[in-house]
Image (cartoon, helix red, strand yellow):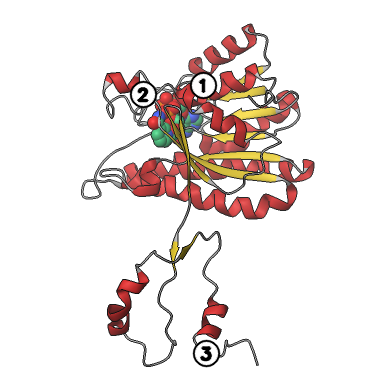
Amino acid sequence: MAPELRYDGQVAIITGAGAGLGRAYARFFASKGAKVVVNDLGGTFDAKGNQRSGAVADQVVDELTKAGAEAVADYNAVQNGDKIIETAIKAFGRVDILINNAGILRDITIRNMKDDDWNAIIDVHLHGAYKTTRAAWPYFRKQKYGRVIQTTSASGLFGNFGQGNYAAAKFGVVGLAETLAKEGAKYNIHSNIIAPAAASRLTQTVWPKEMMDLMGPEWVVPLVGYLVHPSCKENGSIFEAGAGHFSKIRWERSRGLLLKPDENLHPEHVLAGFKKITDFTLKDHPSESADLIGNLTAAGTQPPNKP
Ligand code: NAD
């Protein structure tokens, strides 16, 4: 096996670390030398009602400190992510690793969705991820080092019946991470995205018990551990992890159809060439938008900004 990957002297912030995947990350990083901020407001799975409690974060901190690690609890909602970063700075003076993990569900079809169902989900998953990352960014830039994980979901990547709000928020964090990978690269700040699958209170109604038994959150942890290690060069990528399976997801662009963009271009041309547009025999795997200037030139059109 490769040499042990450790995080000695580093500070890891994990949101929603009072249970499920977040707690598994907290246990892992604490056991590998990191100082850990255990953030969790201890809410209900759908954030309905007012049942918040710091107890879940306290329990995890208690467990980690008893095992000899340094850890502090933070009870802020991720929507106040700046306060979570403040907790890390006050307690440990720095932040190296940020794992945006906190989450809730409000599954409902678009037909029955209320604005509150939409807003609550966007608020926790997307706005929360923005708030923590935005607040950590100046520290990452100053120290020319940072590792960020955004948590998406298969629902965000592929869609899922009854999860329009959740899927939109989870796809939102993909765009955020892909952009921050570009903004952070020259400062050695890496942003990657994981779509986990693990037994937790969010998934207890999704899979049968026999499957849940094989899907411990700890089987997602190794991927996250590697992605945020200083030796890992991966940046801006999407991964799936669950039950010991790890895979990478990437975009695929068909070679497509290239026509001259002028007044003679009509929907009928798209109809006639649709097979070519959707044919993936010739393809690439882009991390940038299509080369429009190159396409204009290839189609025999003079690009507007060229003489
Ligand atoms: P979980 O419910 O066990 O843990 C989520 C934790 O986040 C809870 O302890 C909760 O109190 C906390 N939390 C909720 N809202 C918060 C807020 N506003 N501020 C701070 N903490 C908050 O769920 P989990 O399955 O461990 O999910 C972790 C993440 O993984 C979520 O983002 C979820 O959407 C994502 N995810 C999980 C799965 C899976 O299979 N478990 C699949 C896809 C995505």
Q: Quick check: can you spot residue 30? A: yes
Name the kind of residue labelled 1 in the image.
Arg
> The residue tagged with tag 1: helix, strand or loop?
helix
Cβ of mark 2 under 8 A from ligand 1: yes
Is 38 situated above or below 253?
Answer: above
Name the kind of residue labelled 3 in the image.
Thr
Alpha carbon of mark 2 to alpha carbon of mark 1: how far?
13 Å
| Circle on res. 201 | 2
**Where, quadrant-wise, is the N terminus in this rendering?**
top right
Pick whichever, 283 or 40, lies toward us: 283
Mark 1, mark 3: which one is toward the viewer?
3
Please report the residue visible at 55 percent of the width from the left and 47 percent of the height from the top. Answer: 237
Quadrant housing residue 135: top right
| Outermost residue toward the top in this view | 66
Residue 242 percent coordinates (x, y) = 43, 30
- Tag 3: Cα neighbours inside 10 Å, few (<14), some, or many (≥20)? some
Pick whichever, 22 or 132, lies toward us: 22
Alpha carbon of mark 3 to alpha carbon of mark 2: how far?
56 Å
Residue 147 percent coordinates (x, y) = 65, 39
Name the kind of residue labelled 2 in the image.
Arg
Disc 2, disc 1: CB below 8 Å?
A: no
